[in-house]
Image (cartoon, rainbow, N blue to C red):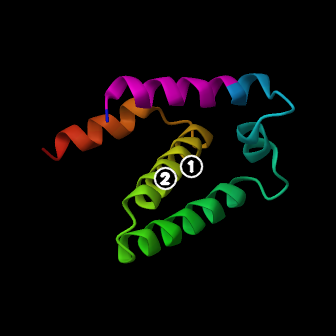
Amino acid sequence: MSDDVLRELFDVIEDRKATLPEDSYTTSLFTHEKGENAVLEKLGEETTELLLAAKDDDREELAHESADLVYHLLVLLSMKGMDVDDLLAELRSRR
């Protein structure tokens, strides 16, 4: 995955957080009555779906669920005032 793709997605998430368009799923996560717990629940759900796809050797579903997991992780980072650069720096430090 290119840094550019992660940065572009994170920029969209940050824009949705700032502008809160009504028809946006991302907006619904930032404004959910459960607050951050809504995203944490989604991360748990997507992790389970990812594991099941891996167990079933379903490559297409594995890619889909991986993308869902990364998206929700980026939303959580945004909620916590972090940036995609924080994630990338940590990944780079593990090389």
The answer to which of 44 and 33 lies nearer the viewer is 44
Give the position of the C terminus as an image quadrant: top left
Q: CA distance from mark 1 to mark 2?
A: 13 Å
Q: Of the numbered discs in the image, which one, if any, rests on residue 64?
A: 2
In the image, is 33 to the left or to the right of 15?
right
**SS class of the residue under badge 2?**
helix
Residue identified by numbered label 1? 72
Q: Amino acid at mark 2?
A: His
Q: Is residue 46 magenta?
A: no
Q: Residue at x 62, y 42 (%)?
A: 79
How packed is label 1: few (under 14 Cα within 10 Å), some, or many (20 or more)? many
Q: Residue at x 37, y 23 (%)?
A: 4
Which residue in the rendered view is the most extreme toward the left? 95
Q: Earlier in the sequence, mark 1 or mark 2?
A: 2
**SS class of the residue under badge 1?**
helix
Q: Quadrant of residue 36?
A: bottom right
Which residue range is magenta in the image?
2-15
Q: Is residue 10 magenta?
A: yes
The answer to which of 71 and 92 lies nearer the viewer is 71
The correct choice, above or below, for 38 with respect to 24 in the image is below
Mark in the foreground, 1 or 2: 2
Q: Amino acid at mark 1?
A: His
